[in-house]
Amino acid sequence: MSDANKKQLRDLAFSVLDLSPILKGGTAADSLRNTLDLARHAEEWGYKRYWLAEHHNMPGIASSATSVVIGYVAGGTSTIRVGSGGIMLPNHAPLVIAEQFGTLESLFPGRIDLGLGRAPGTDQITAHALRRDRRSDGNDFPEQLDELRAYFNAEIKKTVHAVPGEGLNIPIWLLGSSGFSAQLAGQLGLPFSFASHFSPENTLPALDLYRRSFQPSEVLSKPYAMVGVNVVAAETDEKAVMLSTSLQQQFLNLLRNNPGPLLPAVNNIDDFTSEYERALLNQRLGSSIIGGPETVREKLQAFLDKTQADEMIINSQIYDHQARLKSYRIVSELNNS
């Protein structure tokens, strides 16, 4: 691809993925206040959308009641799109999601996104507590998606109606970390968001599958792919590397089956890991972009060159809230230079 045809960061839409991290020594209430503060800054800095993710039984994540938090963020902002990244559809009756997002769209018209995943967002025991039906394992996700979309479609005759919801135009995205949702999104002509921030090795194959499978629809005439990426930006490379140890500790605790709150940064993550754990961290966080402004610019451009993404959604798991704001500010300034 010639330089003239390359996508440039300054032309790319950036969005925010927020897990509402609960900090060591803090509370969920603190985290949700930080979420709204970050959303207001993201709106000011020109981010396109602000997505929240559904996770359950996770001591370090405050966004389990995702639709509620979306309403809180949308109510505290004015223009930025707010949505789910994502709602784990197998955990819910499609009618409930149609009503919840119909309500959100009615309250905040033209600002709500519905991103959907098929994973449980938790462990299997918690998934059973959520779903009750042990047979609900995500394999019927395409059927659930059809049912959900039908609730929004006023032209389909049905006995049960989503009120609010029916007749509203709420953008539906499919999210994934492998090829299943990539292919389904392509076949249905829906936008697709890939979780590069924790599944970097599958990024390019999934994007290729999505684009090859794509069929134009009433929603999209051509593929639209967003990629999730961990970014830790700071004034210098050295400071960013130190700040990134909170993210590394979070993944390390997940690998050890010991999830907990987001921990303060440490000087050297190697002091807390074995060689085997370091290899796993590198595999899971291999696409993370960590550094000062110029390093972040170069690495994000290289990632864009590889993925040819239409949009990037940035996850920054940084313990210090002011440092987290600074990281998102640095990324936003790449659009202006």
Image: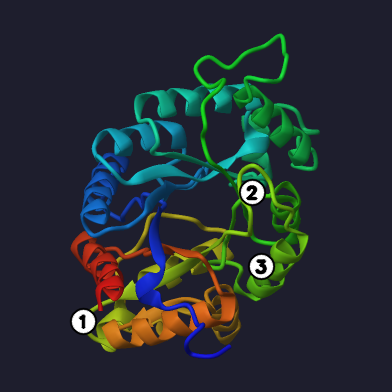
| Contact between labelled residues 3 and 2, with CB atoms less than 8 Å apart | no
> Crowding near pointer 3: few (<14 within 10 Å), some, many (20+)?
many
Element type at marker 3?
helix
Residue sitting at 23 percent across and 62 percent down? Answer: 325
In the depicted view, which residue is nearer to us: 49 or 85? 49
Q: Nearer the viewer, mark 1 or mark 2?
A: 2
Residue sitting at 38 percent across and 55 percent down? Answer: 261
Which of the 4 image quadrants contains residue 330?
Answer: bottom left
Marks 2 and 3 sit apart, C-alpha to C-alpha, by 13 Å
Quarter of the picture containing the N terminus is: bottom right
Residue sitting at 74 percent across and 42 percent down? Answer: 138
**Upstream in sequence: badge 2 or badge 3:** 2
Q: Nearer the viewer, mark 2 or mark 3?
A: 2
In the depicted view, which residue is nearer to us: 5 or 38? 5
**Upstream in sequence: badge 3 or badge 1:** 3
In the depicted view, which residue is nearer to us: 262 or 113? 113
Residue sitting at 53 percent across and 82 percent down? Answer: 305
Residue ID for mark 3? 207
Which of the 4 image quadrants contains residue 278?
Answer: bottom right
Residue ID for mark 2? 190
Residue ID for mark 1? 235
Seen in the picture, residue 289 relative to 183 is either above or below; the reply is below
Quarter of the picture containing the C terminus is: bottom left
Q: Amino acid at mark 2?
A: Leu
> Crowding near pointer 2: few (<14 within 10 Å), some, many (20+)?
many
> Crowding near pointer 1: few (<14 within 10 Å), some, many (20+)?
some
Q: Amino acid at mark 1?
A: Glu
Q: Amino acid at mark 3?
A: Leu
